[in-house]
Image: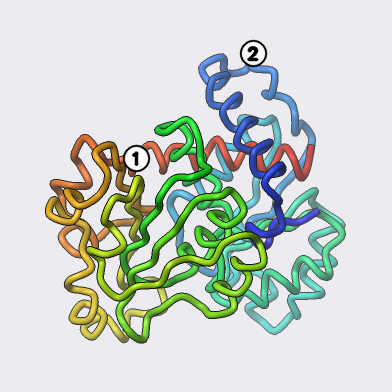
Amino acid sequence: MNLISIADLDGAGITRLLDRADELKRDRPKGASAPSARRLEGKSLAMIFEKASTRTRVSLEVAMRELGGHALYLSSSELQLGRGETVADTARVLSRFVHGITARVYDHRTVVSLAEHASVPVVNALSDLEHPCQILADLMTIRERFGRLRGLQVAWIGDGNNVCNSLILASAIMGMEMSVASPPGYEVDSSVVEKAGQLGHRPRLVAEPEEAAAGADVLVTDTWVSMGDEAEEAERLRVFGRYQINSRLLKLAGPKAIVMHCLPAHRGQELTDEVMDGPQSAVFDEAENRLHTSKAILEWLMG
């Protein structure tokens, strides 16, 4: 079993992981006496990182520690990958040492190749196409706030990026209605839209953020300048200027709407301080839930 795309899970599988993450969150204050504290005892996780990380690295390392296992941080520049060893050979070798592999990579094909050649579970910890681990934390956060997922209105405001792709697919699987507002040239991948239709429901694609936000239960955004996009920063800031989640846009959403951002946030760009620190923000609950969903994923795949 691998988790390369959120679409590797069906609705029942996502629900089971979210239910387990809820249990792990409730049990965490028990520390070493929690039932899960030794669930991955004797197990090791290799974590390959081509991109810098805060939440992904810390949540995975702490998750393994609290489940009784061990995590190894492996920068791609420090592996033999940096000297020309193939991804396939790296996957084969690591499989002889560890019980699972996570990879945070630039190119989605890298994590696909790891999964194809490894004999242990592989988890996509971020690629240019998807970010399934983040979306499970997002779904957990939304369900905590509303008690359900099905039927909720979700609005994505901004770049049609990897996080947006995974949220589109998850929304289709879980019966949420999703609208995406992106400027021309920064729309979501057409193959993801097609896949969402096959899974249950295509997102509504619009150009105006106000149209997407109107009546929404959840407003979601991400940075306008992701790692690898730095050369385009000036142009992106110009193009995305009116796609900011601010108090004006939030007022168009539903009365109990929440705001989410996977972080790191560029305050004053994709969302304002007033919104990010306001009563309708779920940003830091969302960040915390990366830990609990990481534990659920690792326990499911390695335990």
Q: Looking at the figure, which quarter contains the C terminus? A: top right
Other-residue count near label 2 (Cα within 10 Å), few / some / many at <14 / 14–19 / ≥20:
few
Give the residue at x 18% y 56%. 249
Instruction: Kindly identify which numbered label has been placed on residue 228.
Output: none
- In the image, taking residue 188 as reference, residue 244 lies left or right, namely left
The disc label shown at residue 284, or none? 1
Please report the residue visible at 44 percent of the width from the left and 45 percent of the height from the top: 152
Mark 1 or mark 2: whose residue is earlier in sequence: 2
Helix, strand or loop for disc 2: helix
Q: How is the image coloured?
A: rainbow
* Rendered location of residue 147, percent (x, y): 47, 30
Establish if 131 lies above or below 17.
below
* Residue that carries the numbered disc 2 in the rendered image: 33
**Quadrant of the image occupied by residue 292:** top right
Instruction: Note whether 29 is above or below 268 in the view shown.
Output: above
Q: Amino acid at mark 2?
A: Ser
| Cα distance in 3D space between marks 1 and 2 | 26 Å
In the foreground, 28 or 241:
241
Depth check: 70 or 107 in front?
107
